[in-house]
Image (cartoon, grey):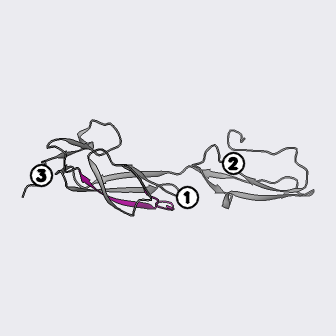
């Protein structure tokens, strides 16, 4: 375990030897090793050089997700488009970025670009791969408003139980008007 400011010291080692040093991130699996490169380093101690200094560093990924819907008033049976953007605001690449979206009741999945890596009911997952520092990935999701939904019935567009009208789509009519 490290000290208060990340310092560490190994004692009771033989004076000479070759050691591989790495940080065990099992307690913080989302953290990304930054120093040393590759996440580990070999340290050689000799009788002439019984002390070595090695800096280890890591960072917590900083991913920011936003979702924008192309319309807030819809007709039953119409298609709406969600643009989901994930941005890596950190200073290191993040591997295996997997945004997940839940289509709420009243919405029916139609298509997405890129194609989802997994669909389980209304739970949809994509794999955007690696996002470099300050790089973004995007998903364009198309969903149909349930054609059997009633006039004036609201369709929630977020995963929360918010009562804000900004979080709802307002259905204008049960059928399209000319």
The residue range painted magenta reads: 125-145
**Few, some or many residues within 10 Å of mark 1 (<14, 14–19, 20+):** some
Image quadrant for the C terminus? Answer: bottom left
Question: Disc 2 versus disc 3: distance between alpha carbons?
Answer: 59 Å
User: Which residue is labeled 1 in the image?
Assistant: 92
In this view, the mark in front (2 or 1): 2
Q: Is residue 141 magenta?
A: yes
Residue shown at 29% from the left, 46% from the top: 157
Going from N to C along the chain, the mark reached first, 2 or 1, is 2
Label 2 close to label 3 by CB (< 8 Å)? no
Label placed on residue 137: none
Mark drawn on residue 175: 3
Please name which of the two marks, 2 or 3, marks the residue nearer to the observer.
3
Q: Secondary structure at mark 3?
A: loop
Please, what secondary structure does the residue beneath circle 2 have? loop
Q: Is residue 80 magenta?
A: no
């Amino acid at each position: 375990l490290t000290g208060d400011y990340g310092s560490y010291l190994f004692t009771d080692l033989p004076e000479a030897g070759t050691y591989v040093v790495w940080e065990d991130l099992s307690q913080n699996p989302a953290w990304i090793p930054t120093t040393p490169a590759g996440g580990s380093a070999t340290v050689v101690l000799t009788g002439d050089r019984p002390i070595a200094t090695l800096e280890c560093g890591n960072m917590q990924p900083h991913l920011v997700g936003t979702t924008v819907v192309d319309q807030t008033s819809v007709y039953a049976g119409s298609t709406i488009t969600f643009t989901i953007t994930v941005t890596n605001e950190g200073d290191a690449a993040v591997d295996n970025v997997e945004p997940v979206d839940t289509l709420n009741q009243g919405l029916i999945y139609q298509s997405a670009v890129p194609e989802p890596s997994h669909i389980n009911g209304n739970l949809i997952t994509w794999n955007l791969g690696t996002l470099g520092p300050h790089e973004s990935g995007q998903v364009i999701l198309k969903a149909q408003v349930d054609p059997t939904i009633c006039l004036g019935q609201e369709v929630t567009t977020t995963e929360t139980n918010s009562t804000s009208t900004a979080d709802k789509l307002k259905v204008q009519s049960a059928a399209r008007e000319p």
